[in-house]
Amino acid sequence: MKEHITIYDIAKEAGVSASSVSRVLSGHPNVSSALRAKVLEVTDRYHYLPSMMAQHLDQGKNNTIGIVMPTVNNPYYSALFSAANEAAQEQGYSTWLHQLSTGGSLIKQDLVDQLIHRRLAGVLLTGSFSDPEIPPLRKAVAMLQNYMPVVALCTPIADLGCLCFHNDLSSAIEQAVRHLYNLGHTRIAFLGGPALSPSSTLRGKSFLDSLALCGLDYPPDYFLGGGYDANSGALAVLQMLSSLPAGRRPTALLCFNDLVAIGAIQQLHKAGLRLPDDMAVIGCDNIFFAAYTAPPLTTIDLYPEKTAQHAIQVLLRSDASASPIAQVMEATLVVRESCGIHLGRRRF
C-alpha cells in the first residue's frame, strides 16, 4: 500500500465502505464486532492514525499522564494510583486513569488509539500480565512509544521495549521461607496466582529455590493454583483441607498476595484451625488491611508508593524512553503475628 494512507485506502483493503471505517474509528455504538475486527485488523497492520488524531497530535502534548490499571478494587493498585497521582501533581501534571474492563490486563487497540488521541505527556502501564496478554502489550508499547514515553510496572517481560519497574521478589520470598523455616516449619505450601501469570510463575520459582536452600522437599500437592482475590485463597485452602489428611497437611502457607492470604485465613478459621498454632500464613503486598487481620498478617512489602513516585519521576524525564531496561525496587518481609514466635519442632 502507498506511504500516505487514507480512510479510503483502509476501506478498500478491508472490503467495506469509508463510512463504515469512520464509524469504527469514532467508536460508534452501532457497529458489529465482526466489522470492528475487520477494520481494526487493517488499521493495525498499517499503523493507520485517523487524521483527527494526527491534527490533535500536531497541536502538542498536554500536561496529563495516563495510568492504565487492571483494577482499582485491589488495595495494592489503589495505593499505586494514589502515589502516582500525588507525584504527578507535585510536578504540575494531572492524571487520567483507565481501568481495564477485561477482568485481566489485556490492552486492546481501541485503548491504544484513545491514549494517542489524548496527546498525553506519558503513560504508566501496570498489571500482572498473563502469557496471552504479553504480545498485545508489546504491540501497544511499540505504538505508544511513537507519541509519548512509556513506563511499565510489572514482572520483567523480555523485549517489552520500555523501561520496566519491578520488585526484588526473589530475595523477599527467600526471607519469608527462611523465616518460616527458622520457626520450625518444614511443610510449607504455596498458594499461587493464575497459572498463566508470569508473576505467579516467578514467585513460585523463587519459592521452590528458597525451599531448596533450606534443604526442604516439596510435594506437588503443596503447590496450589488460584487467582488474585480472597475467594481464590479460600477455595485453595478448602481444596487442601479436603484432599490432604491432617498428618500430611502443610503447617505454613505462603500466599501470592494479601487478598489471597485473607481468604485463606478466613477458610482456616471456618475449619476450626488456629493461627498461628495450627497454620502459619504469609502474604505479599502489605496492603493497609494486612495489619488488621486476625492475627495481623506477616507479609512482603512491595512499597507501591515509593515505586509509583519513582516511576512518575522517570516518566517525565526527557530521556525516559532512552533505555528500555528494568529497574529493580526493594521488597522486604514485614513480620507480624500470623506466623507466631518460635514454635520448635514438637508439632512436626
Image: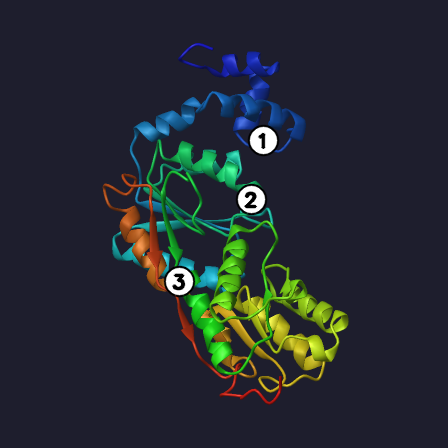
Task: Indicate the amino acid at tag 2.
Answer: Asp
Mark 2 and mark 3: Cα distance apart in space: 23 Å
Q: Of the two numbered discs 2 and 3 on the same chain, state the one appearing first in sequence.
A: 2
Between 257 and 121, the one lying in front of the other is 257
Q: Which quarter of the rendering shows the C terminus?
A: bottom right
Up the image or down, 225 lies above or below 280; here it is above
Tag 3 residue: 304
Between 263 and 67, the one lying in front of the other is 263
Residue at position x 72%, y 70% from top? 238
Task: Indicate the amino acid at tag 3.
Answer: Pro
Other-residue count near label 1 (Cα within 10 Å), few / some / many at <14 / 14–19 / ≥20: few
Mark 2 and mark 1: Cα distance apart in space: 31 Å
Q: Of the two numbered discs 1 and 3 on the same chain, state the one appearing first in sequence.
A: 1
Tag 2 residue: 131
Tag 1 residue: 28
Task: Indicate the amino acid at tag 1.
Answer: His
Task: Tell me where residue 216 appears, x and y as whole percent.
Answer: 55, 71
